[in-house]
C-alpha cells in the first residue's frame, strides 16, 4: 500500500550556481556521498530526490539533516535511497517496507519522484 509520494524539480543552472557560490554546500547536502566528478545535472537530480523523499515521508522531520537521505548506486545501476538518522526513524514510524525512486534530467531541469510503501 502506498503511504507517501513526493516529487521535486530543480533548475540545474541555479543549483550549479549555488554550489559555486557556497563551496561547503556540497558537503552539507551530500556528505561523503559527494562525487566531484558528477555532473551538475546529476547532483541536482540527487538534491531533488532528497526533497521528494521529505515530501513522501510527510514533510518536516525534527532533527533532519540533508545527509540523512542519500542516493546510492553506481553509474548505470538503478538509483536507490539510503535513509539514516531522522529519515530512517520516520520511515520506521510509518512502517515503510519499500521505497521507489526515479530520477531524470533534461532541458536544464532535474526531477525526482519517490514512492513509499508499506506491506500492510
Image (cartoon, helix red, strand yellow):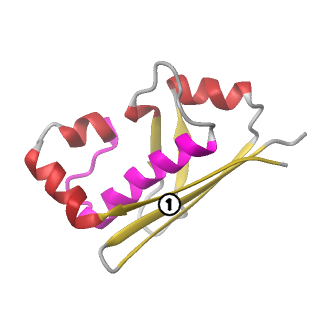
Q: Which residues are magenta?
A: 30-56
Quadrant of residue 70 in the image? top left
84 in the magenta segment: no
Q: Which residue is mark 1?
A: 112
Of residue 9 and residue 65, the one placed in the foreground of this image is 9
Count of numbered tags: 1
- Judged from the image, the secondary structure of the residue bearing numbered disc 1 is strand
Residue lying farthest to the bottom in this orientation: 107
Q: Is residue 31 above or below residue 7?
A: above
Q: Kindly identify the residue that appears in the image at 46 percent across and 32 percent down.
A: 68
Residue 97 screen position, x and y as percent: 76, 40
In the picture, measured across the screen, residue 50 lies left or right of residue 42, that is right
Q: Is residue 19 visible?
A: yes
Q: Is residue 68 above or below residue 112?
A: above
Of residue 5 and residue 46, the one placed in the foreground of this image is 5
Residue 34 screen position, x and y as percent: 28, 45
Residue 36 screen position, x and y as percent: 20, 53
Residue lying farthest to the top in this orientation: 63
Of residue 78 and residue 12, the one placed in the foreground of this image is 12
Residue 37 screen position, x and y as percent: 21, 59
Q: Is residue 39 visible?
A: no
Q: Is residue 21 above or below residue 109?
A: above
In the picture, measured across the screen, residue 83 lies left or right of residue 74, that is right
Q: Kindly identify the residue that appears in the image at 70 percent across and 27 percent down.
A: 92
Q: Kindly identify the residue that appears in the image at 12 percent across and 42 percent down.
A: 22
33 in the magenta segment: yes
Amino acid at each position: 500500500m502506498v503511504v507517501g509520494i513526493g516529487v521535486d524539480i530543480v533548475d540545474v543552472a541555479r543549483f550549479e550556481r549555488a554550489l559555486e557560490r557556497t563551496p561547503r554546500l556540497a558537503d552539507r547536502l551530500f556528505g561523503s556521498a559527494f562525487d566531484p566528478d558528477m555532473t551538475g545535472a546529476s547532483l541536482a537530480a540527487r538534491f531533488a530526490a532528497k526533497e521528494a523523499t521529505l515530501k513522501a515521508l510527510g514533510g518536516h522531520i525534527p532533527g533532519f539533516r540533508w545527509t540523512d537521505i542519500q542516493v546510492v548506486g553506481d553509474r548505470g545501476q538503478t538509483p536507490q535511497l539510503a535513509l539514516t538518522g531522522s529519515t530512517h526513524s520516520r520511515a520506521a514510524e510509518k512502517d515503510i517496507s519499500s521505497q521507489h525512486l526515479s530520477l531524470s534530467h533534461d532541458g536544464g531541469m532535474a526531477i525526482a519522484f519517490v514512492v513509499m510503501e508499506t506491506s500492510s
